[in-house]
Image (spheres, grey):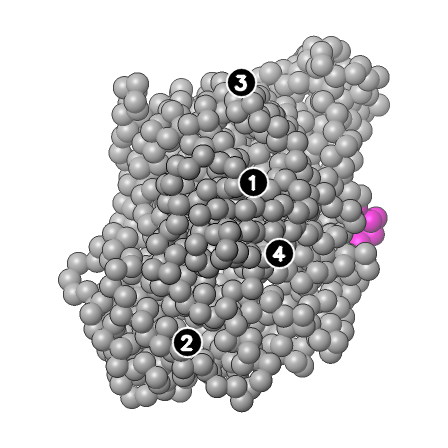
Amino acid sequence: MYRDTPHPIHLEDYRPPEFLIDRVDLRFELDPDRTRVDASLQLRRNPAATRGDGTLRLDGEQLELEAVSIDGHSLLPSEYRVDPDSLTIYRVPDRFRLDTRVRIHPNLNTALEGLYQSGQMLCTQCEAEGFRRITYFLDRPDVMARYRTTLIADRGRFPVLLSNGNRVEEHQLDDGRYRVVWEDPFPKPSYLFALIAGDLSLLEDRFITASGRDIALQIYVEPHNLDKCDHAMLALKKAMLWDEEHYGREYDLDIYMIVAVSHFNMGAMENKGLNVFNDKFVLARPDTATDDDFLGIEGVIAHEYFHNWTGNRITCRDWFQLSLKEGFTVYRDQEFSADVGSRGVKRVSDVRLLRAHQFPEDGGPMAHPVRPDSYIEINNFYTATVYNKGAELVRMQATLLGPELFRKATDLYFMRHDGQAVTTDDFVLCMEETSGRDLTRFRRWYSQAGTPRLEVEGEHDATRGTYSLRIRQQIDPTPGQREKLPLHLPFALGLLDAQGADLPLRLEGEPDERVPGTRILELTDWETRFCFVDVPERPVPSLLRGFSAPVSLHFGFSDEDLMFLMRHDSDGFSRWDAAQTLMQRVLLGMVGDPDKEVPTRFIEAFRGALSDTATDKALLAEVLTLPSESYLGDQMDVVDVEGIHRARTGLKRHIGLQLGDELVQVYCENRDAGVYRLTPEAIGRRALKNLALSYLMSAQQAEGLALCRDQFADAENMTDTMAALRLLVDHGGDEAHHALDAFYRRWSNEPLVVDKWFSVQATSSREGTLGAVLGLMHHPDFSLRNPNRVRSLIGAFCSGNPARFHAADGSGYRFLADRVLELDPLNPQIAARLLKGLIRWRRYDEGRQTLMRGEIARVLEANDLSSDAFEVASKALDDLGRQARPSA
Ligand code: 0A1
Ligand code: ZN
């Protein structure tokens, strides 16, 4: 049991800091066992804060304090107090210098927050509250200071020493060590501090900015990885150019550094001038990384780069405002990826992610607004809601304002708030002031949790030639928020005529302009009606085009309507969505009635789509992919784990058997010989080919197996290799063993590829998978100390294999809780994330509910549980944390 119940922190308790820090001088004597940190801080009273009693309380955790002085005078023991999480100095002047000396132990730091050892390197992670594990500080984002950092280390062991800003000095010391000094001219919050020490190789390039400044671009990796950095460098240069062209933002230092590390809790970190990356988001070669890996790298490199303006130059006032930087930056990286790749496919994958992760979160016991109003542990709030729903809020504002006004509004935001720590409200205010619009009801999106449900009804009046829509909003209560208010949202739609063309859209009372296409309506109330005129025949409505708002949409489409939209809609997203709805209907029908036949017209629609040559192939592959088992579960009142698995496997097999010839043809037509290319067109061909192969393998016929075996043997790129390996592993038997052995033998020296080897086994649909996973935990390459490895085996099983994880005997749940208990003392962030896999227990049948709750309770009983895991477990069991069914 957690000894002292941790207390939540509330947004309404925010107060400006009593003291500000202008300058920080840090001196590190680096040693993995014992690092000495000397900090010299220039402090002064904050004129904007209410005057306190002269007590200064600094954050600090796991620090061994060796000395503390003010303006050069050592403090007497009676003048200060050290607690496990702070240093309190009883009386301080209005303006003074504070010097502290502490010891820290990077090699014992398994939580990977603060200064830690990753392989042979030393690195830091300070967001959100890691800096307090390096030195005593006012560790909050609204305290912004200028940093000068001195790094001292043994040159043989750490020939590269990096920190934020510009390198200003280097000296050899008498004792064989050397000293490097870095200075960052831009004031920054402590969470953006970084340092790196290691034996690293460097890929270097340059970028000339719009105003002609020459920026050195450097990617640092372990020497054997130097051949896997080209893609990341290219992505960086594209991102720099894109930000100049689309937001008028130039880079501001003379050097931009990226370092890849193998031990990292998240994807990457935007430290000023010195990004630290999970190596998964830097390293790629066609034979080691899949197309999705390449796209992921491009997106994350851009994301961290874009943070330089949205996050670093303008930062968050407090952690409740996290979405100020994350929502906006995700929106920016999404638009970048759409521009440099395939826009339609990007939107589909963003919406897929939102529905797979954010909607369930919004309907679960940890549902929170994009701007949460309380938290126990901020690390638990790096969520799909803050990041991805936050991005949707920015997207909606861009839609409501239109491109020109949105750009004007962001220009204003950058100008007005440069160098400040601000709030999401400040952001919306720039939108409001620029457009002259009242966004009062829009702001509710930031403070209100839950996914709105839109019920739409349409009525065609043939005699009047009108088509009217009635749209109703509904938002279920979420934990701590019973009453909800209606939201302001853009609702994009089109009306299709009998040929599938867009009708001109004119609302009653409007002048006749007759431009066909998409129209953006706005909803602000619980119920809104619209009446379109000049609609002689019953149209098929295409609703929520481009997913113009993060809502679940409900309209009584017939199967014919859906097939029609799937074939004709001018909006790529809506074609995909129509196909998903149709497949979902077929699958849920089969779940309800296992003897139900697959409708012939469904197979015909699928056949039609397979032979569609007009559509972008990557989009086509998305259109033809069945909804996932988890997503189907989300659409049911009570998740039927076995029924869903049976139906989905059955439908795949049926498609494979019915459409064998067409699938073989698609497979062969899209096989590319020769060089691997990363164009949207080549990616689309591979996606479609591998999708066809997966249906063929589901049919369990010799032909598919032969193609798959050949592909595995001959593939020269990891996309094709992994596609074949995954299918062979699901096929099982000797085929699986041989392929897995061959793959491991070839790639055992590439940790990121070994991660794939673990994952593919953990996500196998075969019955003995949990046993295999337990066995793999004893593999010499497995380690609980490397988050990528943990995610690749444990995470993949618990969140990527619903049929096996949710085994009715509770073995999957027990496995998860055991791993949480092992991980929590080592790395609470990773443990708490894993634990989230149990919190939606209310969605399952009674037997599973009891088992899941039992495991959460067992975690909660543990001694010295972290505040991270405590928050997740206690909220999951809180009876007030009702759980709604997330809707599509
Ligand atoms: N700001 C980073 C994400 C990040 C957050 C926390 C971390 O450590 C606890 C690390 C990275 C981003 O959005 O990319
Ligand atoms: Zn971010």
Q: Secondary structure at mark 3?
A: helix
Q: Mark 3 Cα within 10 Å, few/some/many (few <14, many 20+)? A: few
Which amino acid, by three-letter code, is at mark 2? Phe
Residue occupying the far front of the picture: 463
**Which of disc 3 and disc 2 is earlier in sequence?**
3
**Which of disc 4 and disc 1 is earlier in sequence?**
4
Camera-side mark, 2 or 3: 2
Is residue 715 highlighted in magenta?
A: no
Residues at marks 1 and 4, CA–CA distance in whole angstroms: 15 Å
Magenta-colored segment: predominant secondary structure? loop
Cβ atoms under marks 1 and 3 closer than 8 Å? no
Residue 542 appears anywhere in the view: no
Cβ atoms under marks 3 and 4 closer than 8 Å? no
Residues at marks 3 and 4, CA–CA distance in whole angstroms: 40 Å
Which amino acid, by three-letter code, is at mark 3? Arg
Q: Which residue is mark 4?
A: 455
Q: Which residue is mark 1?
A: 522
**Which of disc 4 and disc 3 is earlier in sequence?**
3
Residues at marks 2 and 3, CA–CA distance in whole angstroms: 55 Å
For this rendering, which residue is in front, 147 or 770? 770
Magenta extent: 1-6
Residue 821: x %, y % from top left: 68, 63
For this rendering, which residue is in front, 352 or 769? 352
Q: On the picture, is 343 further left or further right than 551?
A: left
Q: On the picture, is 517 further left or further right than 356?
A: left
Task: Give me the disc on residue 416.
Answer: 3
Q: What residue sits 76% from the left and 22% below the top?
A: 56
